[in-house]
Amino acid sequence: MHLLDTDTLTHFHAGNPNVIQRLRSLNDPIVGTTIIIKAELLRGRIDFILKANTADDFLRAQNLFTRTEELLIQIEIFPMTTATIERFEQLLNIRGLSKIGRADLLIASIALANRAVLVTRNLRHFRQIPRLQVVNWVD
């Protein structure tokens, strides 16, 4: 199983050839993302709508929001579970991981609980997390 982080999912949505090629060559039937990443993407799109100042900005923001919703419908979203929260609480107790943001620790916890590989450009950040497998498909 592979879970796409926000950066990778955004690059996929934009048609990044590296991400598309990796997805096509992947011998894994389960590729998804997390509820945390879904929330991050939608929050960003909502903020863009609320900050729009011109008619063009409003229409562009609405279009991006709709396109993001359409993307998220096509991909499996992995939720937080009891196992996720147990992993999260374990990670909170590991010295040095406190510098990693709460959202990223939740993403890592979902990946760990599902024994998934996290696909992200942020290798340096996520490699600090014990037993988490991370790869970069963008670069």
Image (spheres, rainbow, N blue to C red):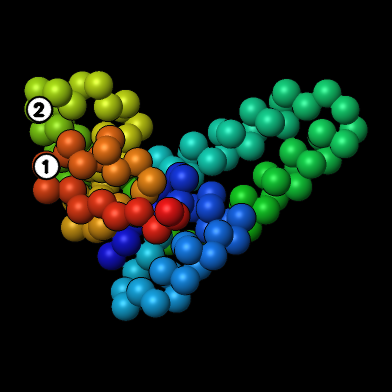
**Residue 106 makes an appearance in the image:** no
Q: What amino acid is labelled 2 in the image? A: Ile
- Left or right: where 94 falls relative to 136: left
Q: Is residue 51 left or right of residue 91?
A: right
Q: Residue at x 29, y 55 (%)?
A: 135
Binning the other alpha carbons within 10 Å of mark 1 as few (below 14), some (14 to 19) or many (20 upward) gives: few
* Residue 105 falls in image quadrant: top left
Which amino acid, mark 1? Pro
- Residue, disc 1: 130
Query: Which residue is denoted by mark 2 in the rendering?
Result: 94
Task: Tell me which corner region of the image, top left, top right, bottom left or bottom right, holds residue 61.
Answer: top right
- Name the spot of residue 136 as percent of width and height, x first: 35, 54
Could you tell me which quadrant the N terminus lies in?
bottom left
* Whether residue 136 is situated above or below residue 59 in the rendered picture: below
- Disc 2 + disc 1, Cβ < 8 Å: yes
Image side of residue 3 versus residue 83, left or right:
right
Q: Residue at x 34, y 69 (%)?
A: 30
